[in-house]
Amino acid sequence: MKRPVLAANWKMNNGPTAARAFMETFLGGYAPRTDRTVIIFPPAVSLSTVSSAAAGRTDVVAGVQNIHWAEKGAFTGEISAPMAKDAGARVVLVGHSERRHVFGETDAQCAKKCVAASRAGLAFMLCVGETIAQREAGETERVVTHQLREGVSQTSNLISADFLLAYEPVWAIGTGLTASAGDASAIHTLLRTQLRQMIGTRGDEIPILYGGSVNADNAASLLRAPEVEGLLVGGASVEPSSWLAIAQTR
Ligand code: PEP
């Protein structure tokens, strides 16, 4: 995947009708680019709409916000990796802070979702990040290292797995607070070192995105920070004009 990676997490916004209108406006203003990748994570009901709209664009791909680790079965309300792939997803978001902290998703469940994504031929984007209490207790490095190591612990042959990481401090998500470029860089550097320990030079190929109250005004300075190779954007990605500005960040 071409770096930088600019990823839009719409959360629970933009159903099929709004998604169609968004994609029309966004793609109308976003000429194909070979110097970056855009990923749109719509709600699952809008996945087909987004992937169909982006058909023929190799620089814009659709992703799914969540999957269940089983392939099918009696799991009312869930969707599986093969189903998401069938609807056009190429990437799965795993361990987003809202999944972890609102829905109680554990590291063990994240690990199973990473396996399920790889098994279905999808890339996964594993999200890690500390809470404010953990940050104030000086536990950031321990927490993100643990989440990374546990998250990929069940993925066999990690060296050939297709995956990305997103560092998203929980205290920065949807709060208007953003990590400084220096703070983001420091954690990204730590994650890069971990990746190198786990999979050698392949670790240099894994994009590490920053997320947490990114907007059109702060995107450029974050993207210039060493080891920040992309952005995962929530609130500011829901409207096409704001997202267009972020996706075109220099
Ligand atoms: C997110 O949903 O991943 C996110 C970072 O949200 P926000 O940009 O709204 O903080």
Image: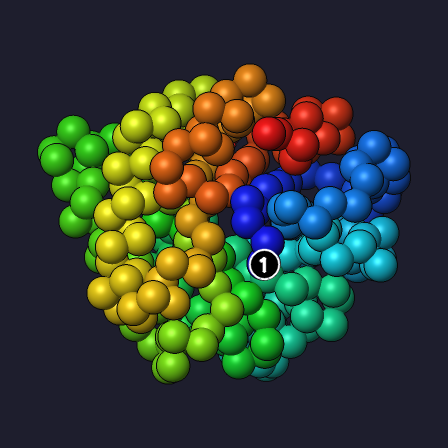
Q: Amino acid at mark 1?
A: Met
The answer to which of 33 and 99 lies nearer the viewer is 33
The C terminus appears in which quarter of the rendering? top right
Residue at point 51% right, 75% down? Answer: 118
Which element carries disc 1, helix, strand or loop?
loop
The N terminus appears in which quarter of the rendering? bottom right
* Mark 1 crowdedness (10 Å alpha carbons): few <14, some 14-19, many ≥20: some
Judged left or right of residue 134, residue 126 is: right
The answer to which of 42 and 7 lies nearer the viewer is 7
Asked whether residue 7 appears in the rendered view, the answer is no
Looking at the image, residue 231 lies above or below residue 92: above
Question: How many numbered discs, if any?
Answer: 1
Judged left or right of residue 18, residue 165 is: left
Colouring convention used in this rendered image of the protein: rainbow
Looking at the image, residue 245 lies above or below residue 15: above
Judged left or right of residue 179, residue 31 is: right
Residue at point 53% right, 27% down? Answer: 219
In the rendered image, residue 136, in percent from the top left (x then y), is placed at: 16, 29
Looking at the image, residue 38 lies above or below residue 114: above
In the rendered image, residue 156, in percent from the top left (x then y), is placed at: 37, 82
Residue at point 51% right, 42% down? Answer: 230
In the rendered image, residue 8, in percent from the top left (x then y), is placed at: 62, 41
The answer to which of 34 and 220 lies nearer the viewer is 34
* Residue corresponding to mark 1: 1
Judged left or right of residue 154, residue 14 is: right
